[in-house]
Image: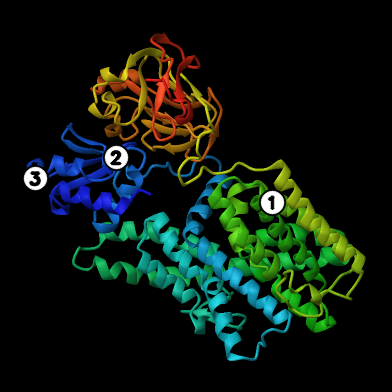
């Protein structure tokens, strides 16, 4: 396994240390340094660093060619220095694009990803602890239980604090200020005000709702924080901006949540609760479908808190909670959907995350890892969970099933429903809620993200035909005016001098890298072949000008799908060479190419064949 930290440290030392670096960005294959004194760079030492292919000096930049692993090495340099943060070209992926729903899902996924394993691990611990209590292995009165419960419950209880950090990184806000805001939302005396009457802030009345385990409020307020900080940093004198900015942000942001977001959540939630209560009274099946289908959606937006008082009111007046039965269907349906992902997924990271998410969802009703880490980003499993929950919830409601205790819906909490209402309808409803999303997810499937790890090994003799991605004239790599491409350091292949301004996918593939600058794309074939298409030489310096990207990283494309459009004439007028290398970048699996085309070519015509390691004998 590559040691990116060692490579980063060696490169940084070789260029003369951080103090000799004026700026650093990276493109598809190389680190691009602007050095204060290029004489201090030790080219021989840099080339000897494991992971470095070669070096080049061009356009006022000292370039260190790394290849596919350049984002990882760049990230490691950022950990041991102050270089690269926020620089153009420092990200290999474009920001979220598409409609608002897709952008929302992309944002939620990016914000939750760093916290997913902690959520999954503590959720699984919660499930095991709940099982131990159910089977009488441990008493809730013991100090052992209290400690274990805190270990398993603390992270999700203080989830806004974790999301404050990841949201700040996503929106480029100050993490510590975000943490201060989140801490105020879950501060013990603040949570103690939940439900208290006649609350005011400088005479402004407000309603306190619980922000424990909440998601949306902290994300919204950190987004506002990021804009406020930019404004304040631009306006405040340098002598005071460092401490006055967080003071002002916290002073405004926290009351804004309490006075605006809290009351809105309370009003919408209360209206939602009243409406669902009316529906349950007049059309129980419809109420069950709404609760079973949309409960997890309510949770995402914090609207479920408006229903909790309705649960409590029903219990106080009747000694039972009719509305709670369908929620079991909602929870188990999302757990079943992620179980379908666990069964069907080929992505190793996805499978390893789906396993504990399935167990914690079924056993303890902890669905956050499943929803935010898997079902919602993949879209289809979340929709299948909604469908299964709605059907199961309708059936359970028709059976008049109720709970005699206020419990967290989960597999282990099912005894709260036993003997209360029509048990046949309960079993049927739960079966539908579990089977429908599981089968839909496992059979219909979903679009998997690209593997973050190395590509799978190529099958014996599994050569891959690479089609021309652009109209033009084929030229040998040796004629490319860039040493790293010309000598084959970055991979085998050919280059094309374009005669049109559109680049297409050369085979069915996953887009593993789509630079926001639009100048380069990394594609991975299902059989493991990885191909880099690099439009022009040094065109990363255009910072996206004259390029219009049509795809994003992680997207699945078919051969002939449009990847990017570019204005070739404008790029040439700007002084850049448009020669476009097309190279195979994983020589450990595909060490050679054959049947290279020559002369004029149109996109979609055979360009060359990538030869797998098992059939490379005799191929030069």
Point out the tag, 3 or 1, that comes first from the N-terminus. Answer: 3
* Callout 1–callout 2 Cβ contact below 8 Å: no
- Across and down, in percent, residue 611 comes to 45, 25
The answer to whether 591 is drawn above or below residue 448 in the figure is above
- Across and down, in percent, residue 55 comes to 20, 36
- Tell me if mark 3 has few (under 14), some (14-19) or many (20+) residues whose alpha carbon lies within 10 angstroms of its own: few
Instruction: Find numbered disc 2 in the image and state the secondary structure of the residue it sits on.
Output: loop
Task: Name the residue beneath numbered marker 1.
Answer: 340
Which residue corresponds to the image point at 16% horizontal and 44% vertical from the top-left? 45
Is 181 situated left or right of 482 in this image?
Answer: right
Point out the tag, 1 or 2, that comes first from the N-terminus. Answer: 2
Task: Name the residue beneath numbered marker 2.
Answer: 66
The answer to whether 268 is drawn above or below residue 485 in the figure is below
Is any atom of residue 478 visible in this view? yes
Point out the tag, 3 or 2, that comes first from the N-terminus. Answer: 3
Which residue corresponds to the image point at 62% horizontal and 61% vertical from the top-left? 357
- Across and down, in percent, residue 603 comes to 47, 16
Task: Name the residue beneath numbered marker 3.
Answer: 40
Q: CA distance from mark 3 to mark 1?
A: 56 Å
- Across and down, in percent, residue 102 comes to 56, 45
């Amino acid at each position: 396994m590559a040691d990116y930290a060692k490579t980063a440290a060696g490169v940084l030392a070789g260029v003369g240390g951080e103090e000799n670096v004026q700026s650093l960005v990276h493109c598809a294959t190389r680190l691009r340094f602007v050095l204060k004194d290029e004489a201090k760079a030790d080219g021989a030492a840099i080339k000897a660093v494991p992971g470095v292919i070669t070096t080049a000096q061009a356009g006022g930049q000292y370039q260190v060619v790394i290849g596919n692993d350049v984002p990882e090495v760049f990230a490691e340099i950022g950990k041991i220095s102050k270089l690269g943060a926020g620089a153009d070209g420092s990200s290999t992926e474009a920001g979220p694009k598409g409609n608002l729903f897709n952008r929302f899902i992309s944002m939620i996924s990016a914000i939750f990803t760093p916290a997913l394993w902690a959520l999954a691990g503590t959720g699984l611990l919660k499930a095991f602890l709940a099982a131990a209590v159910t089977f009488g292995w441990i008493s809730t009165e013991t100090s052992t239980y209290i400690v274990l419960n805190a270990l398993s419950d603390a992270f999700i209880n203080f989830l806004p604090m974790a999301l404050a950090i990841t949201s700040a990184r996503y929106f480029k806000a100050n993490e510590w200020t975000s943490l201060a805001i989140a801490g105020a939302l879950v501060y013990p005396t603040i949570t103690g005000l939940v439900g208290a009457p006649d609350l005011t802030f400088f005479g402004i009345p407000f309603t306190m709702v619980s922000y424990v385990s909440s998601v949306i409020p902290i994300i919204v307020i950190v987004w506002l924080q990021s804009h406020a900080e930019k404004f304040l940093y631009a306006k405040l004198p340098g002598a005071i901006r460092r401490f006055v900015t967080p003071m002002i942000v916290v002073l405004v942001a926290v009351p804004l949540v309490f006075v605006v977001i809290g009351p809105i959540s309370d009003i919408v939630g209360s209206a939602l609760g009243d409406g669902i209560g009316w529906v349950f009274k007049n059309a129980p099946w419809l109420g069950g479908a709404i609760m079973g289908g949309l409960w997890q959606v309510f949770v995402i937006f914090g609207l479920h808190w408006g229903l909790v008082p309705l649960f409590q009111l029903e219990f106080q007046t009747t000694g039972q909670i009719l509305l709670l039965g369908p929620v079991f269907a909602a929870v188990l349906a999302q757990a079943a959907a992620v179980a379908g992902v666990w069964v069907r997924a080929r992505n190793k990271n996805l499978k390893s995350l789906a396993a504990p998410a399935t167990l914690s969802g079924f056993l303890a009703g902890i669905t956050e890892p499943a929803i935010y880490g898997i079902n919602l980003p993949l879209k289809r499993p979340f929709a299948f969970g909604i469908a299964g929950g709605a059907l199961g919830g309708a059936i359970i409601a028709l059976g008049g099933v109720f709970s005699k205790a206020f419990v967290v819906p989960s597999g282990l909490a099912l005894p709260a429903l036993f003997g209360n209402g029509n048990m046949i309808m309960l079993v049927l409803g739960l079966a539908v809620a579990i089977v429908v999303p599981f089968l839909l997810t496992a059979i219909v499937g979903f679009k998997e993200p690209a593997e973050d790890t190395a590509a799978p090994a190529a099958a014996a003799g599994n050569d891959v035909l690479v089609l021309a991605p652009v109209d033009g004239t084929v030229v040998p790599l040796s004629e490319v005016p860039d040493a790293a491409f010309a000598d084959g350091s970055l991979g085998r292949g050919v280059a094309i001098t374009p005669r049109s301004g559109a680049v297409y996918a050369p085979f069915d593939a996953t887009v593993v890298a789509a630079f926001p600058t639009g100048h380069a794309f990394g594609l991975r074939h299902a059989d493991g072949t990885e191909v880099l298409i690099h439009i022009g030489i040094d065109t990363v310096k255009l910072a996206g000008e004259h390029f219009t990207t049509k795809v994003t990283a992680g997207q699945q494309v078919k051969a002939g799908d449009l990847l990017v459009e570019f204005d070739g004439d404008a790029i040439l007028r700007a002084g850049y060479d448009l020669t476009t290398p097309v190279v195979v970048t994983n020589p450990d699996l595909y060490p050679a190419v054959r049947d290279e085309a020559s002369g004029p070519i149109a996109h979609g015509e055979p360009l060359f064949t990538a030869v797998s390691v098992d059939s490379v004998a005799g191929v030069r």
